[in-house]
Image: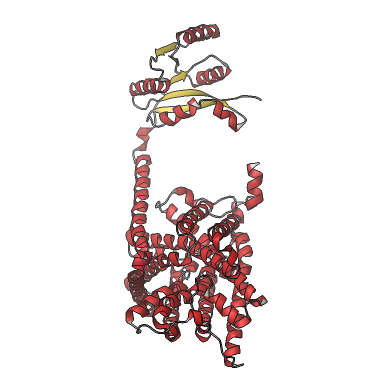
């Protein structure tokens, strides 16, 4: 039943040889790996206005356009820098791979921790922003926004568990629909104002008079808020292995298209917000206000814009569902996270990473009550830290190797490192009290956790490695085997275990712990009737602590072993067909096995006996 349900939800299992067919081409790679960056423009302009409007009022729009221009300039710097990363690191990993290779282990892990936090926040922010677009069109859903957000994240998780190709087809089309719709809205809005000469009517309730002056701090605060428009740019370089061959060429094409779309849509939305002088409304997004001004409140296009915006904001999380599992798989191969994250699931996706992302994002949504503006201050810090480390790593690479046209490449990456470093400081400073402090604490904690995991794997490896004189570990001749067979009652399960123990050879000891003299006497008579030659060793347990006495006995026996000798404990175990029947049995064998496997020279063998219904 479980297998059928799994097959129904995520599809039939795929062969490992089908992995190439699951990868992206440019057409499907663009919407999947760029949905985060493209969707960020839907709320980046709103975040700028939230900072400017209370201070500058109607003067906010001129300042907003200047800030938008600076963000677009930063976008171009980052785009050219990441093209070089794609050329040099075709196996993916982005900032983590670059920083680890050129700056060392700790900077690499800082980049990995920053990216991991960013991916989790991408899912939480995108889903909550998608819910905000839905509630802008249907205000009756406002009290249920947390539930709506969790439902959207669940759908994305399920879609990604179905595999890369299916998720690209399922989630790619809405991204293209958003692009076409939002570009049409920008064109229609600008056409009405500049060609048809219509005069926009701003909502006077949302406008405020200027109450303060333009200051450097105010502009930097607004700039740091608007930098959310750049989140997701790094996803393309992280996901190079997800592209079909030639993967690097396809990745660079997607990066160029992505940068062009972000430039057009971000500047277009900021222009319309300025022209139509929309304000901040906690119940309606800036995009919703623009669509209402351009098309009318009850028009088809208004609802269509809200629908596709909700889709793209929700599906922006798909970038994280592609990027984080891939990053975790690379970290797992390097020994910094659990090995299970390196394994592909039935549909050739990194399903363990997908499930972890679902859990963490859901916890964030619940903790912040599905409020986008509370989550966004946490959002940009990690992104720009990873930007800075990747550009610094590439700069050091060119300065160290000095091959080919390294000078202009070093200039691009050096300038990119400087620009993103300054932006990181600005964002951390301006968003610190709003929640960025939490990210700055989490990053070193994650680095410490990953280093701890790596130390564990190193200790395991050191314990398991065979030295050069490994021949000394091999026995020159077989040693006598010692077997302990615990028994509480003489039955078919015990007889089956005894028969198996006899195949092992050596010295066999049938061991009984007595808690009831009458029961022990009956067991002795039944054992004598079996007519076997192995001694029956009986030990009293006056406190009825059977498991403790058995473990102590086994520990004593294994301490008396010679070098390279092993003690084998054969445990009979019932196998019950119906799961709920297990509640009626003590499961003693399982508990004993979990304790004895920690003894160095003890081998534990479980002999199942199936109970027929």
Q: Quadrant of the N terminus?
A: top right
Specify the quadrant of the image occupied by residue 553.
top left
Could you tell me which residue is drawn at 62 percent across and 52 percent down?
Answer: 10
Q: Residue 225 location in percent, x, y?
A: 41, 73
Q: Residue 224 location in percent, x, y?
A: 39, 74
Q: Residue 364 location in percent, x, y?
A: 46, 57
Q: Is 207 located above or below residue 153 in the figure?
A: below
Q: Quadrant of the C terminus?
A: top right
Specify the quadrant of the image occupied by residue 189.
bottom right
- The answer to whether residue 574 is left or right of residue 108 is right
Residue 248 vs residue 63, the one in the foreground: 63
Q: Residue 463 location in percent, x, y?
A: 35, 40
- The answer to whether residue 558 is left or right of residue 20 is left
Could you tell me which residue is drawn at 36 percent across and 78 percent down?
Answer: 220
- Residue 266 showing in the rendered view: yes
Residue 230 vs residue 197, the one in the foreground: 197
Number of numbered markers: 0
- The answer to whether residue 149 is left or right of residue 418 is right
Could you tell me which residue is drawn at 36 percent across and 24 percent down?
Answer: 555
- The answer to whether residue 379 is left or right of residue 153 is left
- Residue 243 showing in the rendered view: no
Q: Is 365 located above or below residue 199 in the figure?
A: above
Specify the quadrant of the image occupied by residue 193.
bottom right
- Colour convention of the picture: secondary structure
């Amino acid at each position: 039943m479980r297998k059928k349900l799994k097959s129904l939800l995520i599809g039939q299992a795929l062969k490992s040889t089908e992995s190439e067919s699951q990868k992206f081409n440019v057409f499907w790679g663009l919407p999947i790996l760029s949905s985060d960056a493209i969707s960020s423009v839907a709320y980046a302009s709103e975040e700028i206005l939230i900072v400017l409007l209370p201070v500058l009022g109607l003067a906010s729009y001129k300042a907003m356009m200047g800030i938008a221009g600076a963000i677009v300039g930063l976008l171009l710097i980052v785009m050219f820098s990441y093209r070089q990363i794609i050329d040099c690191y075709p196996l993916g990993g982005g900032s983590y791979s670059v920083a680890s290779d050129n700056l060392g282990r700790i900077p690499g892990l800082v980049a990995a921790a920053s990216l991991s936090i960013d991916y989790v926040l991408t899912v939480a922010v995108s889903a909550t922003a998608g819910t905000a677009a839905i509630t802008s069109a249907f205000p009756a859903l406002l009290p249920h926004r947390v539930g709506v957000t969790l439902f959207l994240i669940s759908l994305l998780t399920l879609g990604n568990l179905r595999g890369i190709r299916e998720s690209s087809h399922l989630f790619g089309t809405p991204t293209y629909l958003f692009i076409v719709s939002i570009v049409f809205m920008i064109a229609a809005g600008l056409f009405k104002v500049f060609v048809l000469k219509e005069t926009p009517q701003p909502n006077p309730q949302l406008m405020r008079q200027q109450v303060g002056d333009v200051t450097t701090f105010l502009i930097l605060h607004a700039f740091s808020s608007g930098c959310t428009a750049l989140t997701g740019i790094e996803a393309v370089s992280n996901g190079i292995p997800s592209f079909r061959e030639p993967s690097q060429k396809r990745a660079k094409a997607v990066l160029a298209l992505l940068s062009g779309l972000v430039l057009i849509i971000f500047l277009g939305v900021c222009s319309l917000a300025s022209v139509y002088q929309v304000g901040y409304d906690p119940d309606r997004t800036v995009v919703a206000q623009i669509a209402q001004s351009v098309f009318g409140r009850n028009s088809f296009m208004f609802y269509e814009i809200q629908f596709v915006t909700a889709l793209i904001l929700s599906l922006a999380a798909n970038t994280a569902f592609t990027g984080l599992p891939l990053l975790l798989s690379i970290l797992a191969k390097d020994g910094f996270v659990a090995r299970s994250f390196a394994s592909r699931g039935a549909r050739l996706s990194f399903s363990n990473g997908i499930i972890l992302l679902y859990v963490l994002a859901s916890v964030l949504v619940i903790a912040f009550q599905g409020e986008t503006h509370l989550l966004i201050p946490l959002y940009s810090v990690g992104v720009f830290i990873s930007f800075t480390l990747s550009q610094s790593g590439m700069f050091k690479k060119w300065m160290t190797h000095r091959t080919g046209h390294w000078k202009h490449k070093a200039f691009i990456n050096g300038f990119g490192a400087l620009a993103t470093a300054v932006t990181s400081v600005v964002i951390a400073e301006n968003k610190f009290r709003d929640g960025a402090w939490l990210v700055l604490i989490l990053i070193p904690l994650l680095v410490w956790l990953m280093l701890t995991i790596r130390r564990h794997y190193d200790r395991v490896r050191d314990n398991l490695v065979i030295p050069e004189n490994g021949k000394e570990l091999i026995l020159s001749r077989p040693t006598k085997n010692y077997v302990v067979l615990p028994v509480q009652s003489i039955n078919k399960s015990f007889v089956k275990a005894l028969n198996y123990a006899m195949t092992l050879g050596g010295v066999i000891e049938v061991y009984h712990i007595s808690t009831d003299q009458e029961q022990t006497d009956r067991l002795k008579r039944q054992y004598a009737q079996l007519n076997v030659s192995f001694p029956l060793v009986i030990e009293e347990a006056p406190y009825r602590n059977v498991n403790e006495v058995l473990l102590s006995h086994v520990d004593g026996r294994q301490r008396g072993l010679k070098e390279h000798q092993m003690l084998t404990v054969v445990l009979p175990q019932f196998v019950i067909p119906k799961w709920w029947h297990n509640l009626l049995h003590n499961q003693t064998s399982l508990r004993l096995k979990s304790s004895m496997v920690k003894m160095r020279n003890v081998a534990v063998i479980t002999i199942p006996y199936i109970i027929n219904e």
